[in-house]
Amino acid sequence: MKSLFKSFFSKKDMESNDGLNHVTDLKQGDMVEMDNDFSLPELLRGVTFQVAQKTLYEYEDDKETEWVLKSDTNQIVFLSYSQDDGEESVSFSLKLLPEDVGKIFDLEEFSAVFDDEYSARLDQVTPVEPFESWLGSQYLRTEFAEAGYYHKNGSFNGQGEAFDYFQLKSQCGKFGINIEVWDGGETDVSISINKPLSVIKNYWGKTA
């Protein structure tokens, strides 16, 4: 399977910058190459990813496109884009396993994120491998139980899957924690890092 994946992932049959020069143009099958920037986590640095899926998150006053990226080693990274006062940035996210959450955060402190009586703050953060460069030293809650809908196909066809969204950010604004609580109580926790759009060095569009 690995050799088959590498064959599929090859830049053969791809066209560099052929009408594709911005992250918002990405669609399934396209590829992006990250800059070899030492400010990036090693998992991202100089790596080429293929867009495995394009999805959509819908909120009351906002929507957010998310691209699921896959490397040739099958590493999954989630990518989103934002613009603020003309400054473009991208966010890369990693989903944590439940055991990783327990290793990185104090679980009693972490549980306060879901209690509206507290202004949740995470001060006990343990930078365990391989997540050290993805973590801030402390976080403050910025979103509490915001209602959202997840559209797996990347469009507004149908209502989407409902969830409650919680977010925490580091004081420097470079790191985040994103929590999605789905109907039935299943909870997804991911950690994110924000970078300038320029860390994406190159784009390849899949040819027809």
Image: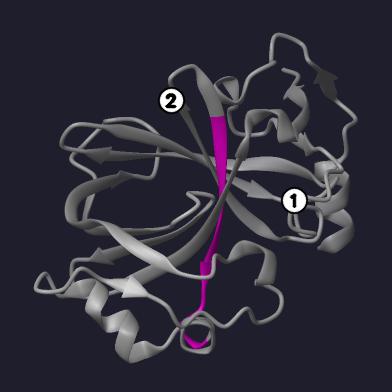
Name the one closer to the observer, 127 or 16. Answer: 127
In the image: residue 40, left or right of residue 27: right
- Picture coordinates of residue 53, whole percent (x, y): 54, 42
Element under disc 2: strand
Q: Which mark is residue 84?
A: 2
Of all residues shown, which one is farthest toward the front? 171
Color theme of the render: one colour
Element under disc 1: loop
Name the one closer to the observer, 189 or 49. Answer: 189
- Picture coordinates of residue 101, whole percent (x, y): 47, 81
Q: Is residue 59 above or below residue 145?
A: above
- Bounds of the magenta span? 89-99
At a point 53% along the width and 70% down the height, the residue shown is 137
Q: Which residue is mark 1?
A: 40
Q: CA distance from mark 2 to mark 1?
A: 21 Å
Which amino acid, by three-letter code, is at mark 1? Leu
Please rate how many residues cluster around mark 2, counting C-alpha atoms within 10 Å: few if below 14, some from 14 to 19, many from 20. few
Q: Is residue 108 above or below residue 185?
A: below
At a point 77% along the width and 11% down the height, the residue shown is 18
User: Magenta segment, principal secondary structure?
Assistant: strand
Q: How many numbered marks, from 0 up? A: 2
- Quadrant assignment, res 142: bottom left
In the image: residue 38, left or right of residue 54: right
At a point 43% along the width and 19% down the height, the residue shown is 85
Check the picture and name the quadrant holding the C terminus: top right
